[in-house]
Image (cartoon, rainbow, N blue to C red):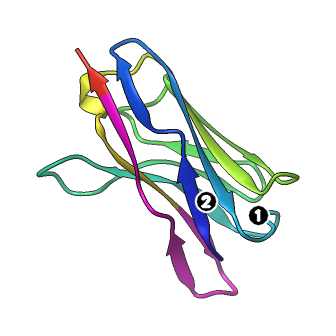
């Protein structure tokens, strides 16, 4: 599978952005899809995930502000980010895992910059 992330940009603190991850094949049977981020000089960290059944999981730092969703018809997984903070500045990458693949696939990153 190929993953294409989009939607990053520059926004002021308190603003919103919506990231989208488009898959080259149906996401219906993909067990897990989600997002990680990596800020300069920091380790990559988990942001959010969603299962094929629609169960979601979030990092504590984004709970209540970010919402992950998947659109099986469009083969996309989106990340709605509200009330953005400067500490959300990072390169955001989407991933997909299906047990039959035995591997995790990554899309290219998209830069999110939040100014104070």
Labels 2 & 1 near each other (Cβ < 8 A): yes
What is the magenta range?
95-113
Q: Which residue is mark 2?
A: 33
Separation of residues labelled 2 and 1 (CA atoms): 8 Å
Side of 70 relative to 62 (left or right): right
Side of 3 relative to 48 (left or right): right
Q: Earlier in the sequence, mark 2 or mark 1?
A: 1
Position in image of residue 105 (x %, y %)? 53, 74
Q: Quadrant of residue 31?
A: bottom right
Position in image of residue 13 (x %, y %)? 33, 14
Q: Quadrant of residue 9?
A: top left
Query: The N terminus appears in which quarter of the rendering?
Result: bottom right
Pointer 2 local density, CA inside 10 Å: few below 14, some 14–19, many at least 20 = many
Q: Main secondary structure of the magenta part?
A: strand
In the rendered image, the residue lying farthest to the right is 73
Secondary structure type for disc 2: strand
Q: Residue at x 26, y 20 (%)?
A: 115
Q: Which residue is mark 1?
A: 27
Query: The C terminus appears in which quarter of the rendering?
Result: top left
Towards the viewer: 54 or 79? 79
The magenta stretch spans residue 111: yes
The magenta stretch spans residue 110: yes
Q: Residue at x 53, y 39 (%)?
A: 7
In this rendering, the count of numbered labels is 2
């Amino acid at each position: 599978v190929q993953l294409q992330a989009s939607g990053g940009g520059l926004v002021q603190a308190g603003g919103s952005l919506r990231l989208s991850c488009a898959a080259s094949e149906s996401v219906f049977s993909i067990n897990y899809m989600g997002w990680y981020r990596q800020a300069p000089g920091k380790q990559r960290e988990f942001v959010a995930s969603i299962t094929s059944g629609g169960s979601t999981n979030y990092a504590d730092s984004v709970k209540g502000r970010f919402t992950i969703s998947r659109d099986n018809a469009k083969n996309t997984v989106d990340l709605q980010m509200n009330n953005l903070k400067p500490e959300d500045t990072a390169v955001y990458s989407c991933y997909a895992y299906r047990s039959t693949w035995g591997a995790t696939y990554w899309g290219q990153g998209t830069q999110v910059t939040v100014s104070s």
